[in-house]
Amino acid sequence: MGLFGSSFEEKVQAALEAIRALGLGVADLNARVEGKVVTLQGTAPTMEVKARVMQEFNARVETDNTLNQIRVAKAEPVGLPGPAAEERWHLVVSGDTLSALAKKYYGKASLYMKIFEANKDQLSNPDLIKVGQKLRIPS
């Protein structure tokens, strides 16, 4: 404890403890201190959490600069309906058929109806696709 309260490093550590207590799910949250420049490190579950940690830290500690080097874990889509979770698109060119697209994307031409069903809003016949159409290719 310094003459005028906590040292800068103690304030940084206290801020980190308070942020950890929020239960935001940041793994290995720590800080590197060089003078009055603080570099935050760890792994956050989302970009929103990464930003929140920075906001919470800056509200607790006055620094010359705070660098946010918190990584964001690769997240799996949560709460999204099946096919939309990884939606692909194909722009139809001359010579394309639904069977050829099924072979290209799924490895089996016989799965052409999967593409047809996903595009019923613009297709009325699986044998009639037009150059320039943008077709959904479901997972």
Image: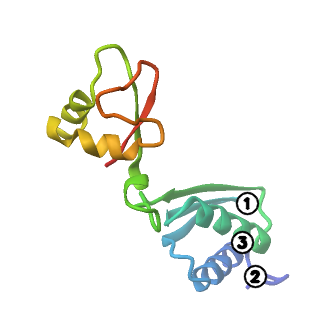
Q: Secondary structure at mark 1?
A: loop
Q: Is residue 84 above or below residue 25?
A: above
Q: Is residue 88 above or below residue 76?
A: above
The part of the image, by quadrant, that contains residue 38 is bottom right
The part of the image, by quadrant, that contains residue 131 is top left
Q: Secondary structure at mark 2?
A: loop
Does residue 70 appear left or right of residue 103 in this picture?
Answer: right
* Kind of residue at disc 1: Lys
* Kind of residue at disc 2: Ser
Upstream in the sequence, badge 1 or badge 2?
Answer: 2
Separation of residues labelled 1 and 2 (CA atoms)? 14 Å
**Contact flag, marks 3 and 2 (Cβ < 8 Å):** no
Disc 1 packing (10 Å; few <14; some 14–19; many ≥20) = some
**In x, y percent, where is residue 95?**
28, 15
Looking at this rendering, what residue extends furthest in the top direction?
Answer: 94
**Residue under circle 2?**
6
Disc 2 packing (10 Å; few <14; some 14–19; many ≥20) = few
Numbered mark located on residue 135 in the image: none
Upstream in the sequence, badge 3 or badge 1?
Answer: 1
Q: Is residue 138 above or below residue 124?
A: below
* Kind of residue at disc 3: Glu
Q: Secondary structure at mark 3?
A: helix
Separation of residues labelled 3 and 1 (CA atoms)? 17 Å
**In x, y percent, where is residue 107?**
15, 37
**Residue under circle 1?**
36
Separation of residues labelled 3 and 2 (CA atoms)? 19 Å
**Residue under circle 3?**
56
**Contact flag, marks 3 and 1 (Cβ < 8 Å):** no
**5 or 55: which is nearer to us?**
55
- The reply to whether residue 34 is visible in this rendering is yes
Q: Please name the residue shown 81% across and 84% down the image.
A: 5
